[in-house]
Image (cartoon, rainbow, N blue to C red):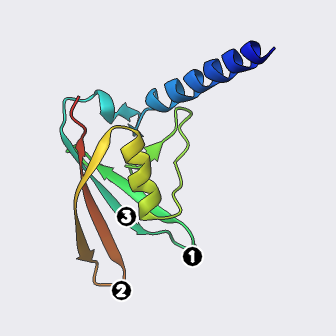
Amino acid sequence: MKKKIATLFIAGACMFFTNINAQHILVNDTDINDLPIKYCELRVTSALMSLTKVKVYVDYGQKWKAFSRQNIMTDDKKVVRFNSAVAALNFMDKNGWVYVEQTIQNNGDGNVTYKYLMRKKAE
């Protein structure tokens, strides 16, 4: 009985870790982990009408289009919501990206945008 429980535990752990490594980072239906790029930038601003959430936009060198979301999205096209910039950085780390540096941009309207340069982890 103990062997069966141990086997189930190990099988469950393997499936759990497989799912973590299989995640995608979708930006407008583009999985940036599959692109031949080395860097991307997270742009983090306060979410309107929210004291607890932030907006995270991703710049990986793509052409920016008016009214086009540059958000991290799930496979079913829902925007991933983050509670803080650190939550977004942890998400990126889990998905194969390393923090390089941060800059701050004053938007002139009292709001600030934090920019985090990320690099793909070496394989």
Q: In the image, what residue occupies the spot 57% across and 71% down? A: 52
Q: Is residue 115 above or below residue 57?
A: below
> What distance separates the C-alpha of mark 3 from that of mark 2?
15 Å
| Distance CA(mark 2)–CA(mark 1) | 15 Å
- For the point 75% across and 13% down, which residue is it? 4
Query: In the image, residue 8 lies at what x, y percent?
Result: 70, 18
Q: CA distance from mark 3 to mark 1?
A: 14 Å
Q: Amino acid at mark 3?
A: Val
In which quadrant is the C terminus drawn?
A: top left
Q: Secondary structure at mark 1?
A: loop
Front position in the image: 27 or 6: 6
Q: Residue under label 1, please give it.
A: 51
Residue in view at x 50 percent, y 24 percent = 18
Judging by the rendered image, the residue that carries numbered circle 2 is 110
Amino acid type of the residue tagged 2 in the rendering: Gly
Q: Which element is circle 2 on?
A: loop
Q: Position of residue 33 (x, y in %)?
A: 32, 32
In the image as oriented, which residue stretches furthest toward the right?
1
Mark 2 and mark 1 in contact? Answer it, CB < 8 Å. no
Q: Earlier in the sequence, mark 3 or mark 2?
A: 3
- 55 shown above or below 78: below
Please report contact status of discs 3 and 2: CB closer than 8 Å, yes or no: no
Residue type, mark 1 in image: Leu
Horizontal relation, residue 98 to residue 6: left or right: left
The mark lying in front, picked from 2 and 1, is 1
The answer to which image quadrant residue 25 occupies is top left
In the picture, the disc for residue 37 is: none
